[in-house]
Amino acid sequence: MSTQTPTTAAVRNPRWRLLGGVLGAVLVITLGFTLYWAQVGRFHQNTDDAYVNGNVVQITPQISGTVVGIGADDTQFVKAGQPLVRLDESDARVALDQAEAQLARTVRDVRNLFATTSQLEATVQVRETELAAARSDLDRRQHLGASGAVSGEELRHSMDAVKAAQANLLAAQQQLAANRARVDNTTLEDHPQVRDAAAAVRNAYLTLSRTELPAPVSGFVARRNVQLGQRVGPGAALMAVVPLDQVWVDANFKEPQLARMRVGQPVTLTADLYGGHVVYHGKVEGFGAGTGSAFSLLPAQNATGNWIKIVQRVPVRIALDPRELAAHPLQIGLSMKADVNVRDGGNGERLPQLARQDGSWSTDVFTSGEQVADRRVQAIIQANDPASAVHAAAAQRATPAALLADNPHQARAGTARHLQ
């Protein structure tokens, strides 16, 4: 009969062997986690309090009018320059016709000023000739008067004729000077009256072009509020266009997570929409100027007796890779998970004060009307100026049918881009 010590029996007990295995596994896991944290984990800051954000471009009219057409509805994709809302243009066309007629009348009036100047110059020359003749006649009579061949009355008539000629010359010179003051150092097109009338034409044409509201950017229509027949005024929000190719992520990190976070650090993100198998790669683009609570509608008032410290969160903007965004589009408001690699974040400034000149948005869908308005102005000026070498061609372009062909709503295919 064999004898066993208590220690040997405890070692052979299955429960003790299981407990030892569990303790060993815990030690291995703890050691592995410690090594992972030392080598990798402590250089990553992550949060699931992150959401997709982007530009929401409001479509607002610049003039008052009645809505007679709507070119897009919610969820539809539109291109930059595509008509979205059309206002009644009857009043604007009448105003444009009146401005063009006034420009034509002003051009003819200014032409008359230039012609009057030439006429007055000729009149001055005539008066100068008359004065010279009167003085010559007076000198002749004065020589003859010394011998008694001319009577004193005839001599006085000659002197009166000289004075009258001098007065006529002075009046003609003053009329010439007054008329020259209105046309000196100007041409027909540069004359202030013509420029003022031309500006009125451009203003009326721009008002007509603004009866159609184009899409400033390419994107999806959202929040359409406008209805047919609605009377709208300047600045009224009619709808919005969201360019989903220009979105970013706002990730809200806790205060302790920001210590080593710097602009330019790489970020990996996943969206709840696609799950973990779709990974986005971005970079830290900037930090909010304050915590979320500081810019809330009702900021927290901590100067009270019942104060409880709450860890604050700061929004961090993360730029996404455009190619990955095109392959897997995101919508504004979607939830994201962000992981920032802060391994190289110990040396740079946390809030660098760098004035960036390359980050801006631009669109050119509103610039086409100015060139067409200038063409209309030039056509009207040349059509009412027979001295122009291209009078015949200008007159043909200035006919009502030809002018209406310069539709302010045509060829408005503009572009909108984010300069980076």
Image: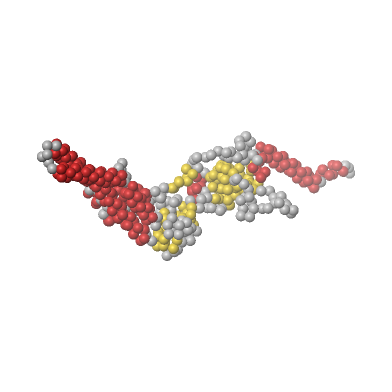
Taking depth in this image into account, of 369 and 117 the one nearest to the observer is 117
Report the residue at 66% width, 45% height from top.
255
Which residue is situated farthest in the bottom direction here? 229
Instruction: Using the image as rendered, state which of residue 112 and residue 35 is in the foreground.
Output: 112
Give the camera-side residue of 82 and 108. 108
The residue lying toward the viewer, choosing from 165 and 353, is: 165
Location of residue 26 in the rendering, given as x and y in whole percent from the top left corner: 74, 43
Q: Please give left or right for residue 323 compared with residue 142 in the image.
A: right
Please identify the quadrant where the N terminus is shown.
Answer: top right
Residue at the limit of the structure toward the top, as seen here: 347
Q: Is residue 140 visible?
A: no
Q: How is the image coloured?
A: secondary structure
Q: Looking at the image, how many numbered discs can be counted on the residues? A: 0
Residue 328, percent from left and from top = 51, 49
Looking at the picture, how far across and down is residue 72, in whole percent? 43, 58
**Drawn side of residue 359 relative to residue 106, left or right:** right
* Residue depicted at x 71% and y 50%: 309
The answer to whether residue 43 is above or below residue 333 is: above
Q: Does 152 sit above or below residue 109?
A: above
Kindly give the residue lying farthest to the left in the view shown. Answer: 149
From this viewpoint, is residue 351 visible? yes
Q: Residue at x 46, y 55 (%)?
A: 59
Answer left or right for 356 relative to 25.
Answer: left
Residue 156 at what x, y percent from top left? Answer: 17, 44
Q: Which residue shows up at 80% across the image and 47% down it?
A: 15
